[in-house]
Image (cartoon, grey):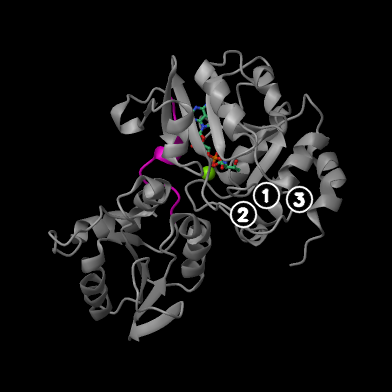
Amino acid sequence: MTLPDAHSQIGSAVAVLRAGGTVAFPTETVYGIGADVSNSSAVQRIFEIKKRPADHPLIVHFADASRLHHWACEVPEQASRLAERFWPGPLTLILPRSRHVPKNVTGGQDTVGLRVPDHPVALALLTALGTEGALAAPSANRFGHVSPTTAAHVYDELGASVDMILDGGPCKIGLESTIVGFNGQTAIVLRPGGIPLAALAEVLSGKVVLPEREDRTVRVPGALASHYAPATPLELCSSVFLWPRALELATNGLRVVIMEWSSKELNDLNRAENEGIVRFAMPAEPAAYGSLLYATLRRFDHERFDRLLVEEPPDDSAWMAIADRLRRASCVPSYKIQNQDPIPRSEQEHYHEAR
Ligand code: TXA
Ligand code: MG
């Protein structure tokens, strides 16, 4: 597939959007599929293409951070500070929606997710829509699946159901934006993402709440148990348990791939160690790991492994978004060395039925 240069396609993309069509576009996090926020049938089409339930809200993307008050009717001081510091960038703010945001965009909720993406193609497209323009855009994948980080991923997944795909190359960050909601002046991280927690805490003078410690009053589908999931059943394993578990599965005739970050002895990327078992080295640095994660999961799906064993990431806040996505992508609870039992058959069956 060859796609024309994205910048020369902005005019056509705007025409598609104004005619009520959908356009997939690159951002610094993942590719989104966008519709004119004010066109309800175009927004409806996005839910259909993604097979996404209608009550799961979309993020509104716009170009000019100073227009925050146009899209939100109330902006806490903490939200203004975050927007000022991180936009354009991988931050989504959940705020009370203004009358410019139709309810079908927010899944019926009175709050809206707002984001100014940091990608030249996205910004060119959003700017070309004019100061009143914005795109309602979720990630350009089917509901529950892994987000796309290249135009080819979008094409593979959504094909002709999307009217146009702008190719801006691979996404730099590769994981979705950090989502922050507010309870009064308290900022709550609803989804860890492209902005490290430490950077948020710095702007908010340390006052950041993680969702585990807070009642959720807003809906975040990314928080569903099975989300961001590849087709290959994925198990999270602590380092010491990876190899015994792989051997156990291989003995039962399964083709297994192990995805490791800590291995020092793996010097080429993809090396067969044992019949039926492939080891794959990931970067030991979180930004590099995050940018490769989804593309790597897709690659394993293409190669049709029976099982993917992922080494648990370090217990460190810099890895929080990666750990979050891996937990949601896994088909079973993580297995640690103290739990040497094989996965109970009932759980395996449950997993296969659920797919
Ligand atoms: O990086 C990203 O955020 C990408 C790019 C394309 O911008 N977008 C993205 O969109 O990940 P999506 O729809 O795949 O995930 C957005 C998340 C969903 O979990 C949604 O529920 C949540 O944001 N969200 C959006 N509006 C919300 C609202 N009003 N209240 C609570 N959660 C909201
Ligand atoms: Mg998504």
Q: Nearer the viewer, residue 200 or 21?
A: 200
Residue drawn 13% across the image and 63% down it: 341
> Badge 1, how many Cα within 10 Å: few under 14, some, many 20+?
many
> Disc 2 designates what residue?
171
Q: How far apart are marks 2 and 3 (CA)?
A: 18 Å
**C-beta proximity under 8 Å, tags 2 and 1:** yes
Residue 188 drawn above or below residue 244? above
Question: Looking at the image, is mark 2 or mark 3 nearer the viewer?
Answer: 2
> Badge 2, how many Cα within 10 Å: few under 14, some, many 20+?
many
> Disc 3 designates what residue?
164
User: Residue 295 in magenta?
Assistant: no
The residue type indicated by label 3 comes to Met
Name which of mark 2 and mark 3 comes first in the sequence: 3
- In the rendered structure, the answer to whether residue 274 lies left or right of residue 33 reads left
Q: Position of residue 248 (x, y in %)?
A: 21, 75
Name which of mark 2 and mark 1 comes first in the sequence: 1
Residue drawn 37% across the image and 76% down it: 279
> Disc 1 designates what residue?
26
> Which residues are drawn in magenta?
218-229
